[in-house]
Image: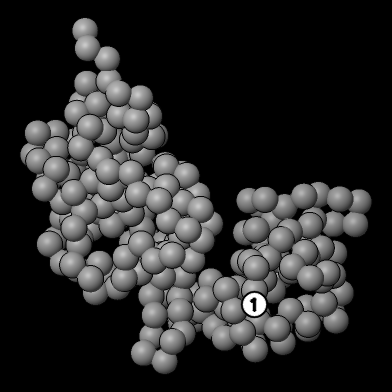
Amino acid sequence: MPTMPDSTSKHGQTLARVPIFSGLTECELGFLASRTVSRHYSAGEMVFGEGEPCSGLYVVESGNVRIFKSSPNGREQVLSIDGPGGSIAELPVFDGGNYPASATAIDEVTLLFVSKQDFQALCLAHPQVSLKVLRVVGARLRRLVGIIEELSFTTVRHRLASYILRLAQKSGIRTAEGVKVSLPTTNQELAAQIGTVRELVSRNLSRLQAEGMLKIDGRDVLICNQKALESENEATE
C-alpha cells in the first residue's frame, strides 16, 4: 500500500481533530488532506477581510485566530478566538457569499486551506459532513445571540465582570489570596472583546479595584472577592 507524504499525513491528523470532519475514514481524510494547502501567518497578519469573496475555509493547525467585525469609525467587536482544531468560514462556503467578518493571526499561525470546490465536493460525497457543519454554525449562532444580548441589555461593568470570571474558569490560577488571571495584551483588545471603548475598560477596572474585588498588576489580575464579582455578573442595567 502506498504511503502518504509526511505533510499529507500531518494534515490528515489535524483534520481528524476538527468536529466537522470527525467520522471520516482515514482514506477519506487522506483524500481531503492531499488537497489542503498549508498557509503561515505572522502575529497581526490578516487572513481575510470582511466583505472579501470567499475562496474556501480554513482549519487552525497551530496558533490562534481572531474573528471580528469592524464599524466605519474603526471600533471592533471580537466574535471568537479560534485555536488548533477549529474551523473558520464554513458559512460563506455554503451560501456563496463574501466573508462576513475579518480574521487576523493573534500569534504565529499555521492554517490549512480547503478550497470551496473541494469542500463542496466532499459534502456531496459525504452528507454527514454537511450536518456537522450545521451543528457548528448553529453553535456559533447561539454564541452571536449571546453577544447581542450582552451588548443590548448589560452594562460595561457587567460585561467586564463576566469576561474576567470566564477567564478565571478557563485559565485562572488559584492562590491563597484568590484567583489570578491574565488580561489581553491591551485595554484596546479587551474593549474589542466586550464591545466597548478603551477608556471605559480602564475606568471600570479601576473602580472594581477600588471596591476591593480585584488587584491589578499590569496585565495580571487577582480576583480578591469572587462572590462580589459574581454579583456584578448577575446584575443588569
The residue positioned 69% from the left and 74% from the top of the image is 232
**Would you identify the image quadrant in which residue 181 lies?**
bottom right
Q: Secondary structure at mark 1?
A: helix
Residue 123 pos. (x, y %): 14, 40
Q: Is residue 73 above or below residue 223?
A: below
Q: Is residue 231 above or below residue 33?
A: below
**Would you identify the image quadrant in which residue 18 lies?**
top left
Residue 55 pos. (x, y %): 18, 58
- Point out the image quarter for the C terminus: bottom right
The residue positioned 81% from the left and 63% from the top of the image is 222
Closer to us: 12 or 8: 8
Q: Looking at the image, can residue 91 be seen?
A: yes
**Residue positioned most to the right:** 176
Residue 33 pos. (x, y %): 26, 33
Name the side, left or right, on which 76 lies relative to 38: right
Q: Looking at the image, can residue 24 be seen?
A: no
Name the side, left or right, on which 188 lies relative to 6: right
Name the side, left or right, on which 23 lies relative to 147: left
Closer to us: 14 or 41: 41
**Would you identify the image quadrant in which residue 99 lies?**
bottom left
The disc labelled 1 sits on which kind of residue? Asn
Closer to us: 82 or 1: 1
Q: Residues within 10 Å of mark 1 (few under 14, many from 20)?
A: some
Residue wearing tag 1: 187
